[in-house]
Image: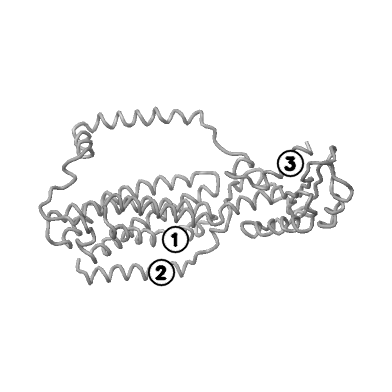
Amino acid sequence: MSRRFSWLIALVIVIASGALMGLLGGGDSAEQSPVAVPPASESARADVLRRDFPGGDQVPAILVVTRTDDGNLSPADVGAVTTAFPGPPPQVSEDGKAALTVIPLSADLSGFDLTDKVKELRATAADELPDDLRAQVTGGPAFGADIANSFSGANFTLLAVTAAVVALLLIVTYRSPVLWLVPLLVIAFADRVGSVVGAAVAEALGMSPDGSASGITSVLVFGAGTNYALLLISRYREELGRTHSHHDALDTAVRRAGPAIIASNATVVLALLTLLFASSPSTRSLGVQAAAGLVVAAVFVLLVLPSALNLFGRKLFWPFIPEVGATPLTDSGIWHRVAAAVARRPARVAVVSIGALALLCTGLFATPVGLSQTEQFRVQAESVSGYDTLAAHFP
């Protein structure tokens, strides 16, 4: 593959990917909260029927008010709540230490639109109520808003941390100040394309892509893409020790590593597609998005990465540039001995490995699955603390 041809391939794929991203658009999937309830579930059917009743187009947010000194509420305190939130009078608890009022919200609000509305309620409570009163917004809308808000900025954080880990891994592996940049940039671009393509495929299949699936897909694309890149570059480096032409070395590396990369990618993609059998819409969408993202990652590693590597040649491995005739690193070391042992007794190793995995899987039978609504947050959320306050004063 010539240098000019490499430029052409890389340029065509980048332009085509950019056009595809522009055509499909980023959408608003990253702003959507997960849809965990199957449409056929009882709660989902009840939600559909609810709209036929008067006021069914609204859902209640609950404002719980207590004093900061945990004392009894005075008539003036209750009046302040009524003034800040006109409507039905607040209900005071039997112990006189808490009051609640119901604030109707549109049932059509979801995602960050719901988050903004709940933020507005909380800001109003903070601004309009006296400083000696503590206000907490809870209820279904508040839980939904806090869950949606938990994904705010999560994709960027996941992407930044994942990219940093990948960069560190590449630097440690190849001990080159420049080599790590090439696969990292290729995989980063593949991640952006994979996210758009995955969301578009999910929407085309009638699914609802959300922020959590987008974040998980990015991590999978970076992780799998890095593995594919390591395999290809390792084979490329090995071939550079056998020929003076880095073009021939790269062609051989792609031919030899390509089948392994495709097989690995197909295995993971098929495994992810089994999520289509899940009952949760979010889980099904995750399977489709992640599978599409990994296919894009494999395409970029097999087509774009070789073109990028071919542009720079041997000097990309500086300061440890492979020399022709050097002893291949794969012919020695602990992993060479492990591979040789597996090759000598493949059946025995397979039986022992499967048995060990089966033994380790027995722990899953006693593993609790699922979280309650108040257990879904790693940090304290106002919807959870408000719920606890509500339960304490309105048993």
Check disc 1 and give the amino acid type: Val
* Numbered disc 2: secondary structure: helix
Q: CA distance from mark 3 to mark 2?
A: 51 Å
Residue 101 at x, y percent in the picture: 80, 49
Q: Is residue 349 left or right of residue 127?
A: left
Q: CB atoms at circles 1 and 2 under 8 Å apart?
A: no
* Numbered disc 1: secondary structure: helix
Give the residue drawn at x 29%, y 29%: 351
Identify residue for label 2.
18
Judge whether 212 appears above or below 2 on screen: above
Q: CA distance from mark 1 to mark 2?
A: 11 Å
* Numbered disc 3: secondary structure: helix
Identify residue for label 3.
389
State the residue in front, 383 or 228. Answer: 383
Quick one: quadrant of the C terminus?
Answer: top right
Q: CA distance from mark 3 to mark 1?
A: 44 Å
Q: Alpha-carbon neighbours of circle 2 within 10 Å: few (<14), some, or many (≥20)?
A: some
Judge whether 78 appears above or below 185 on screen: above
Give the residue drawn at x 35%, y 52%: 168
Furthest residue in direction left, as rendered:
325
Give the residue drawn at x 54%, y 32%: 368
Check disc 2 and give the amino acid type: Gly
Q: Is residue 100 left or right of residue 249?
A: right
Q: Could you say which disc has been placed on residue 169 in the image?
A: none
Pair 3/2: label in front: 3
Residue 118 at x, y percent in the picture: 69, 56
Identify residue for label 1.
197
Q: Alpha-carbon neighbours of circle 3 within 10 Å: few (<14), some, or many (≥20)?
A: some
> Which comes before the other along the chain, label 3 or label 2?
2
Judge whether 97 appears above or below 144 on screen: above
